Image: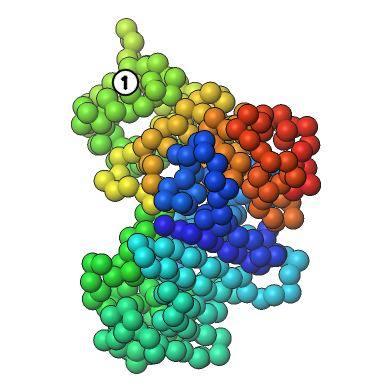
């Protein structure tokens, strides 16, 4: 699991900001927010333009570095506009069984890596400083990668189609995972598996404009009667009472309908909230693998507060071990019935992230009305 993430000088975040998933406060309620002593369900509040979306992009940047593919379109300024520092730093600390892995790197931009380092159980496995062409690979045997052809890697650092790689310096970890035969129980393979299953889902109008190609792929899944019934049951569980019917049209295309005396086209009539639910289902449920980490940005932007609560309950039940961070403006969700004070956070305009239990001098208990405290200004200092 991801134990700690640290970021500095990226977009909104000039100063260092950390998410410490191990920093729990020992509450005995809403224990389904904690997995193996680590926060697995987190809700972040923040006013507009505090950087909630950018925080999610930063968390997902590791997949760009390791795999060279972007799962989102990252536009605009990369480095913090008020900083004179010319690099952004990213640090991820993981624990896999009894081993701790830290992967740290710095970027000049989306396309250019400055340096990267890998540590396992406090030991430096490798370090690469691309700016000064300084490299250290002396502990590769610790991960059974001593057969790696370092000369071949060094030759490839400045060679290749940069438009294809989207990197002017090839990350060594990416090269190592692609060019060395590692055992299935290798900690690097465990890292690879975790990062491959990280998702970021952002609410907004883009969620509601699903391309025909995506619909066709989704409809192919729904041709399975059990899958169509599963989607129908999901919507009904969320409070959308409906009967779904999938039909194949004369031109070979498929279309989804609400089942009434007369069929009603689903995508032409469904509310924005219903469409957002289906988009969430489409991007999560049909996968044949379980996500390891999900960042749901403003997940409830189109939901009534009761539906938002149902979605949280569903995610807890469906993915008990998955680390899920949700962002929201909905203070109705700021309740101990759903979460707990060490899993509810405020992201400030200054770029600080503070758990509610650390944002007041009071000792927060299960009976406290957290929403009322928030609205009355109890936590204003941390906004």
Residue 225 lies, with reference to residue 350, above or below; the image says above
Residue 241 x/y as whole percent: 40, 16
Quadrant housing residue 364: top right
Q: Determine the residue positioned at 52% across, 38% down.
A: 28
At 36% from the left edge and 27% from the top edge, which residue is drawn?
234
**In this figure, which residue is indicated by the disc labeled 1?**
244
Q: Measuring from the top left, give residue 79's x and y in whole percent.
A: 65, 67
Q: Tag 1: Cα neighbours inside 10 Å, few (<14), some, or many (≥20)?
A: some
Residue 254 lies, in percent from the top left, at 27, 30
Q: Quadrant of residue 161?
A: bottom left
Q: Examine the rendering and report whether any part of residue 338 can be seen.
A: yes
Residue 59 visible in this rendered orientation of the protein: no
In the image, residue 161 sits, relative to residue 69, either above or below, namely below
Q: Residue at x 63, y 29 (%)?
A: 367
Indicate the position of residue 23 as horizontal and vertical percent values.
56, 54
Q: Dividing the image into 4 quarters, which one contains the N terminus?
A: bottom left
């Amino acid at each position: 699991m991801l134990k700690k993430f640290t970021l500095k000088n990226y977009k909104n975040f000039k100063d260092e900001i950390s998410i410490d998933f191990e920093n729990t406060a020992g509450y005995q309620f809403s224990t389904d927010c904690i997995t193996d002593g680590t926060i697995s369900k987190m809700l972040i509040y923040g006013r507009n333009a505090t950087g909630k979306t950018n925080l999610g992009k930063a968390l997902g940047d590791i997949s760009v570095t390791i795999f060279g593919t972007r799962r989102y379109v990252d536009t605009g300024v990369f480095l913090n506009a008020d900083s004179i520092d010319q690099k952004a730093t990213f640090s991820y600390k993981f624990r896999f069984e009894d081993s701790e892995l830290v992967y740290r790197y710095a970027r000049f931009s989306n396309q250019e890596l400055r340096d990267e380092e890998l540590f396992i159980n406090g030991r430096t496995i490798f370090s690469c400083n691309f700016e000064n062409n300084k490299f250290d690979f002396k502990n590769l045997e610790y991960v059974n990668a001593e057969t790696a052809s370092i000369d071949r890697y060094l030759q490839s650092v400045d060679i290749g189609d940069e438009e294809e790689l989207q990197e002017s310096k090839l990350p060594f970890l990416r090269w190592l995972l692609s060019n060395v035969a590692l055992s299935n129980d290798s900690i690097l393979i465990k890292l690879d598996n975790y990062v491959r299953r990280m998702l970021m889902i952002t609410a907004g109008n883009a969620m509601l404009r699903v391309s025909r190609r995506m619909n066709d792929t989704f409809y192919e899944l729904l041709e399975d009667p059990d899958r169509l019934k599963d989607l129908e049951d999901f919507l009904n569980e969320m409070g959308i009472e409906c009967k779904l019917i999938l039909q194949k049209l004369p031109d070979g295309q498929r279309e989804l309908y609400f089942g009434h005396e007369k069929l009603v086209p689903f995508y032409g009539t469904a509310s924005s909230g219903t469409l957002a639910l289906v988009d969430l289902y489409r991007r999560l449920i049909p996968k044949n693998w379980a996500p390891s980490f999900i960042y749901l940005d403003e997940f409830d932007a189109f939901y009534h507060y009761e539906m938002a609560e149902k979605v949280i309950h569903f995610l807890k039940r469906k993915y008990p071990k998955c680390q899920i961070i949700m962002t929201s403006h909905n203070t109705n969700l700021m309740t101990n019935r759903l979460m707990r004070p060490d899993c509810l956070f405020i992201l400030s305009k200054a770029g600080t992230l503070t758990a509610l239990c650390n944002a007041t001098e009071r000792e927060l208990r299960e009976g406290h009305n957290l929403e009322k405290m928030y609205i009355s200004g109890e936590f204003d200092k941390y906004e």
